Image (cartoon, rainbow, N blue to C red):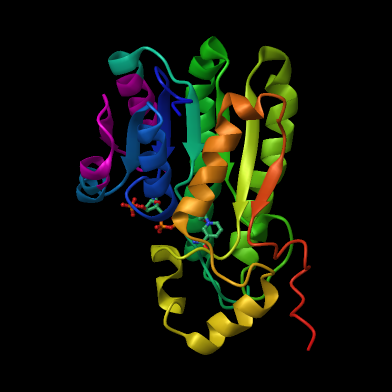
Amino acid sequence: MSRFTGKVVVVTGAGSGIGQATALQFSREGAAVVLVGRTEEKLQKTLSQLATGDHLVAPCDVANVDQVKALRDRVAEKYGRVDVLINNAGSVVQGRIHEVQPDDWRKLMQVDLDGVYFCIHHFMPDLLKTQGNVVNISSVSGLGGDWGMSVYNAAKGAVTNFTRSLAMDYGADGVRVNSICPGFTLTDLTEDMKDDEALLERFYDRIPLRRAGQPDDIASAILFIASDDARYITGVNLPVDGGITASNGQPKQA
Ligand code: NAP
């Protein structure tokens, strides 16, 4: 199956986790993938695993608007088109709000929210030409509250509503905008939790499918929503979470 042959797909945060798995799946389906992240070595490692194609390693800090503009110009010069933008780069801040320092707040907002805006702002003119689409990687944390995650939730909640309004603004132009909302997924972001068996047990108790997500589980949903298979879907924030949203986070009753 090659749903993306001839398409150019920009994936931010492509050096690890969900972004890396997404880049791999897009390359297997024929896309030329632009690998974006701050650390070139990580992007090169992703590149070495991709299926053959005309891919591009493009180091860029999405929190820096000048770097994002330069990224857009570099992509335009190489390919002359963009079909799909995956806004996946992100970081996390934990703690109750009186413990969170203004610098931590700012840094998180600069990556998880400003970065999404900068990329959409600069790539939208290209997407309008191809009638392409945007997939923002939000989170189940963008759909409801969570303990000790208010800063992250504020950013991801903004991304889910941003997604809805952008879908409205660009629908008539043929540009779709959706988000994927992963639940707990095993990546570098959750590295510090993966050996805490008691914590994992509590998590799994609330997840109907009884396991954490793998990056490939999320990537498959990203490819679906970015593909023509989802041509009548826009403005959706799709949970890909083993059912935790459906369960309202309630543990299984004995
Ligand atoms: P990850 O492995 O840490 O991936 C995040 C990637 O983003 C890294 O490769 C990082 O590379 C890149 N990045 C961070 N800041 C950046 C910046 N300013 N500019 C460009 N790239 C940047 O974590 P992940 O779990 O795959 O996260 C991917 C997305 O999924 C995030 O938006 C996250 O919020 C979301 N998500 C994750 C989970 C989960 O449980 N894992 C759940 C819900 C949502 P560099 O440091 O080299 O730049």
Which residue reaches farthest front? 1
Location of residue 151 with respect to 69 vertically, above or below: below
Q: How many marks?
A: 0
Residue pictured at 71% horizontal, 20% vertical: 171
The reply to whether the magenta stretch includes residue 61 is: yes
Q: Indicate which quadrant contains ligand 1.
A: bottom left
Q: Nearest the camera: 73 or 51?
A: 51
| Residue at image location 49% in from the left, 86% down from the top | 197
Q: Quadrant of the N terminus?
A: top left
Camera sees residue 64: no
Q: Visible in this render: residue 84? A: yes
Magenta residue span: 46-75
Residue 218 sits above or below residue 196 on the image = above
**Residue 164 on image: x %, y %:** 73, 36
| Res 227 quadrant in image | top right
From this view, report whether residue 214 is shown above or below residue 122: below
Residue 101 horizontal/vertical position (percent): 52, 70
Does 250 lie within the magenta span? no
Q: For this view, does 95 lie left or right of residue 172? A: left
The residue under the point 35% across, 31% down is 33
Between 230 and 16, the one nearer to me in the picture: 230
Quarter of the image that includes the C terminus = bottom right
Q: Position of residue 236 (x, y in %)?
A: 72, 39
- Residue 60 image-quadrant placement: top left
Q: Position of residue 139 (x, y in %)?
A: 61, 55
